Image (spheres, helix red, strand yellow):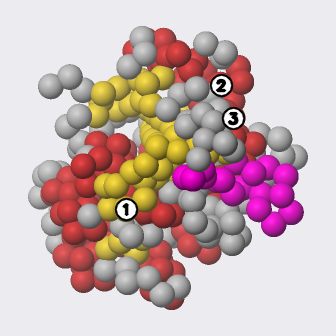
Amino acid sequence: MERIPVIFDCDTGIDDAIAILLALKIPAFDIKGFTCVAGNTPLPKVLRNTGHVLELAGVDLPVYAGADKPLFADATAPTAEHVHGKNGLGDLEFDDPKRAPESMKAWDYIYEEAKRQNGALELIATAPLTNLAMAFLKYKELPKLIRRIVIMGGAASYGNVTPAAEFNIYTDPEAAEIVFNSGVPVHMVGLDVTLKAWFNAEESEKLSAVNEQGMFCHLVGRGEMRYSLGHGFPGMCLHDPCAVIYAAYPELYKTDTVGVHVETLGKYTRGKTVTDFLSDKQFPVKNAVIVYDVDREAFRDKVFELIGSYSA
């Protein structure tokens, strides 16, 4: 089987960590490296968390530092410590990873790897899209070298930071608009579907008994489980794992091809992924695939299968 070369762009918090563990066990993926951006937690913590998860997975892959704030902002990026904890991983304690981040910047690495892969590279982004936007702004030929971008972000329906905007897009809407208009096919795995991809408390407990990695997923997710249950969901919403599973197993999902643009100016709608289902009059170019439904039980079983493939 010919494997797909992938760069994983992340702001490693709780669900990114679980998504990374899943991605590393998907047979179709050849993960080349990880690029990090401020988001769920500040950039130094994202780098540390990513290195820790890779060590937990038993793999030695490069990690690259990217943007520590949004594209056009003077201030640092907003964080989500109320969900992910002060260290981004539910405040679990762990040692610093042994391998240090690479010296090359994330956007330069994306370009260099895209050239090496000669058009076969895919990007999975579970974070604000600043690193990708920086790469597209710096390297005009880059869109021709990337086959597909799968993002966790946005929604056609509603937001989770404001009534209109989802966190990853809201954090840097200008960057998101650049990515959606890059010419690379974008697959938007947003709140429309990720809120349907959940684990309940019983399923999380069951995963904890599988192996060390399953126990980590359970322990790191306790805070997010409380947050989700407190907001009326039946379990912990696995936003980033939902995007990773979609990238490899699209048959578990329902999709539509649409036009998407990001609102960057609206007083109430900044960060909204405006999605045109109705006609081609507003957005004549259908630049995205929106993922809007998932077979929740099949998704759950796939998570168990992939985590279970780590040795017990």
Say whether marks 1 and 3 touch (CB < 8 Å). no
Q: Secondary structure at mark 1?
A: strand
Write down the residue under mark 2.
Answer: 136
The residue beneath circle 3 is: 178
C-alpha span from label 3 to label 2: 8 Å
SS assignment at label 2:
helix
Q: Is residue 296 left or right of residue 221?
A: left
5 on left or right of 140:
left
The alpha-carbon separation of the residues under discs 2 and 1 comes to 30 Å
Going by the numbered disc 2, the residue's amino acid type is: Phe
Residue 293 is labelled as: 1
Q: Whole-percent x and y of residue 267?
A: 86, 63
Could you say whether the residue bearing mark 3 is in a helix, strand or loop?
helix
- The residue under the point 56% across, 59% down is 155
**Residue numbers of the magenta segment:** 262-278
In the image, taking residue 129 as reference, residue 204 lies left or right, namely left
Residue 235 occupies quadrant: bottom left
Q: Considering depth in this image, is 98 or 263 the residue closer to the camera?
A: 263
Sooner in the amino-acid sequence: mark 3 or mark 2: 2
Q: Are marks 3 and 2 in contact (CB under 8 Å)?
A: yes
Q: Which quadrant, please, contains the N terminus?
A: top left
Residue 45 shows in the view = no
Q: Main secondary structure of the magenta part?
A: loop
Compared to 90, does 42 lie above or below? Answer: above
